[in-house]
Image (cartoon, rainbow, N blue to C red):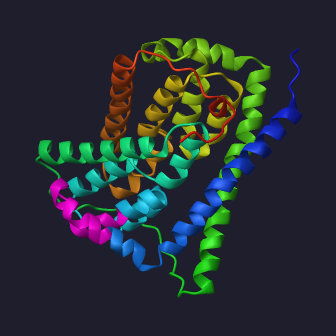
Amino acid sequence: MKRIQWGRGVRSGLITSWELGKVIFPVTLLVSILQHTPVIDWFVRGLTPIMSWIGLPGEAAIPLVLGNLLNLYAGIGAILSLDLTVKQVFILALMLSFSHNLLVESAVCRRVGISVFLVMGVRISLALLAAVLVQWSWNGGGEAAAYGLIPNSPSAPQGGWETVWAASETAVMGVLQMAIVVFPLMIGIQILKDLRWLDRFADWMKPVLLPLRVDPRGSVIMAGGLLFGLAMGAGVIIEQAREKRFTWREMTVMVLFLAACHAVVEDTVIFIPLGINVLPLLLIRFGVAVLLTLLLAWFWPGSKPVDRRVAAGGDCA
């Protein structure tokens, strides 16, 4: 009977939750405060000319800004307040599935040594490219969108300390929600390690990672990101980057795959209230992620030794 090291799992959960909290709290606090200032309006005005290129009205910039600066929930909440067609809602959902929560999730990528600008650039480019392709290839979807399960929007704070208090409350809740997922997840990962189930899983994933020329140990990172996302799955990603000696190329390939396609269950189901068919959304997102990483693996066959800060989970932007 293999011995399970519970203490190591608890310690790993506490350390990882603390590391992520130091990123998530200040970012969420800052953006939540900016949401009640003219800064968001400036973003909207700057993005309005681009909206016409992808068949969206100017006000559609609001859910894109909120979704990218905050999270998918904020973006979807903004969509529910707009009168849009089915095609326009699908385009917005597709863009947000590729590009959302950029500040927090890019900061997580930086913790394992991948450039914030690279991750943001790839995700925004994929969102714009997907929107253009859908706009010019789909002739249907002109009927008005019918939303379901519309949530009640909370009243906005009036300003001053009330705004700061509401923003702090949002930031604290964000950290707590993250910890609720990450803490038991890291204990579960330790159990899987002690029972050597992760080794078996790595063997099962080897045929998938082989075309990407990524070591089978990367299966843990890939599974964590696919199931829990970059922010919630960051505990697995950071922990594995700290323990394993992945090359910089391997980390880049895995992170860019997950940047395009992560939290596939949650990020797909969450769009159901918008009244669109989420299956094409999932297939497009997953297909683009596979194609992106296959092309990257094909044109970047070489390998660069990993920086020691990457293996330790340090910054290397």
Instruction: Give residue 164's quadrant in the image.
Output: bottom right
Instruction: Give residue 202's quadrant in the image.
Output: top right
Instruction: Give residue 54's quadrant in the image.
Output: bottom left
Image coordinates of residue 90 in percent, x first then y, are: 28, 51
Q: Residue at x 21, y 53 (%)?
A: 87
Image coordinates of residue 47 in percent, x first then y, are: 27, 64
258 sits left or right of 148 in the view = right
21 sits left or right of 13 in the view = left
Q: Magenta span covers which residues?
A: 44-63
Q: Residue at x 41, y 38 (%)?
A: 260
Can the viewer see residue 149? Answer: no
Q: Is residue 291 above or below residue 89?
A: above
User: Magenta stretch: residue 301 in it?
Assistant: no
Q: The N terminus lies in which quarter of the figure? A: top right
Image coordinates of residue 123 in percent, x first then y, are: 38, 44
Most foreground residue, 302 or 105: 302
Most foreground residue, 157 or 272: 157
Q: Is residue 211 above or below residue 191?
A: above
Q: Residue at x 44, y 15 (%)?
A: 302
Image coordinates of residue 213 in percent, x first then y, are: 47, 15
